[in-house]
Image (cartoon, rainbow, N blue to C red):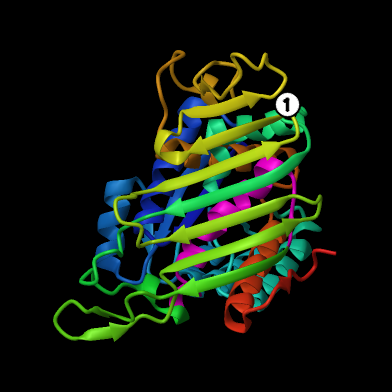
Amino acid sequence: MTTLGVGMVGHAFMGRAHSQAWRSVGPFFAPPLTPVMTALAGRSAERAGAAAATLGWASVETDWKELLRRDDVQLVDICTPGDQHAEIAVAALDAGKHVLCEKPLANTVAEAEAMAAAAERARERGVRSMVGFNYRRVPAVTLARRLVADGRIGAVRHIRAQYLQDWLADPEAPFTWRMDRERAGSGALGDIASHIVDTAQFITGHTLTGVSAVLETFVPERPVPGGGTAPVTVDDAALFIARTDRGALASFEATRVATGRKNALRIEVSGSSGALSFDLESLNELWFHDGNDDGATAGFRRIVVTEPDHPYTGRWWPPGHVLGYEHTFTHQMADLLTAIAEGADPSPSFADGLRIQRVLAAVADSAASRRWVDIEGSD
């Protein structure tokens, strides 16, 4: 097999980002499998048809189950709200389709467990799955992981992670599905805290073992287009501290009401002999401190992550020509296609997604009970 037929479910924000990635991965990365944008599934034939024409999909289905019946679809890409992830992913894997599922993996631990079990069953038949934590594929983040693994900052002691947005700071911002627990599972916790938990664990190689948390909803109801209001049943902000399996301390803050912050995902890792700092709003930069430098001139130095030997960047432009948010999805597709072609397990796996889901559940439990909560499966 030299091509891989892709069927995507959903065509809003994430659907557009994934479509861009499927279009660009072949020309720039020449993966061992060439993706074919075979079919786009959406409930409205009119809207899905318009999206398919704009985004480059060859055909349209109004029922995602039709993707599972098509011989020209070998991979299902799930870009829906979280309440649909489990049903689609389990059915697709059981039907022998590879699956890429957007994060967070599910809305509940039970759903994530079912998805991880389906992934393991499918894996035994050579069917692969991956959860879409795209910030792992920021070149500077992957470089940070490499530096930690190479021992450049020594033993990790502190992890400080933030994800700050302000799109809900205005109380008059309208109600969307992301504010409905039934559809989204949680608010800032699942939407963006899941990203910083995964990114922190990816960079350091540590896993979280326990948390102490608070959650807050600052605006309890939001206006609905056309009149009236709807109750907000998820959190606006999440704040928690954690310990890791290797003895590090960590702090996490995720909010969608941080006035003036648009998409500030920030990670700082302090080790016994150095430190790293990253900010998504300057995503081509990684700040590195080597604690072995001469004290008179020591300090953080900026690395512009655009060199050919930096992760992913050599496939794009000449040195110094920066990349953007959309490139992380292209990197994700390149890694996934390579893993499928090689019969390898893509990363992050559904098992990884399940571990993140257990962290989110522990945070919610801690906030509700006002106590320290150990994370299931972290022993």
Name the residue nearer the viewer: 219 or 322: 219
Which region is colored magenta?
Answer: 183-209
Q: Is residue 318 left or right of residue 115?
A: left
Q: Secondary structure at mark 1?
A: loop
The residue type indicated by label 1 comes to Arg
Q: Is residue 133 left or right of residue 225?
A: right
Specify the quadrant that holds the C terminus.
bottom right
Most distant residue in the front direction: 296
Q: Is residue 186 magenta-colored?
A: yes
Is the magenta region chiefly helix, strand or loop? helix
Residue shown at the point (65%, 53%) measured from the top left: 250
The residue beneath circle 1 is: 152
Q: Quadrant of residue 157?
A: top right
Q: Position of residue 369 (x, y in %)?
A: 63, 83
Q: Position of residue 365 (x, y in %)?
A: 63, 78
Q: Position of residue 262 (x, y in %)?
A: 33, 49
Q: Is residue 28 above or below residue 120?
A: above
Answer whether residue 315 is visible to the viewer in this image: yes
Q: Position of residue 226 (x, y in %)?
A: 14, 80
Q: Total marks drawn?
A: 1
Name the residue nearer the viewer: 240 or 73: 240
Q: Is residue 112 left or right of residue 254?
A: right
Q: Is residue 37 above or below residue 65?
A: above
Q: Is residue 304 magenta-colored?
A: no
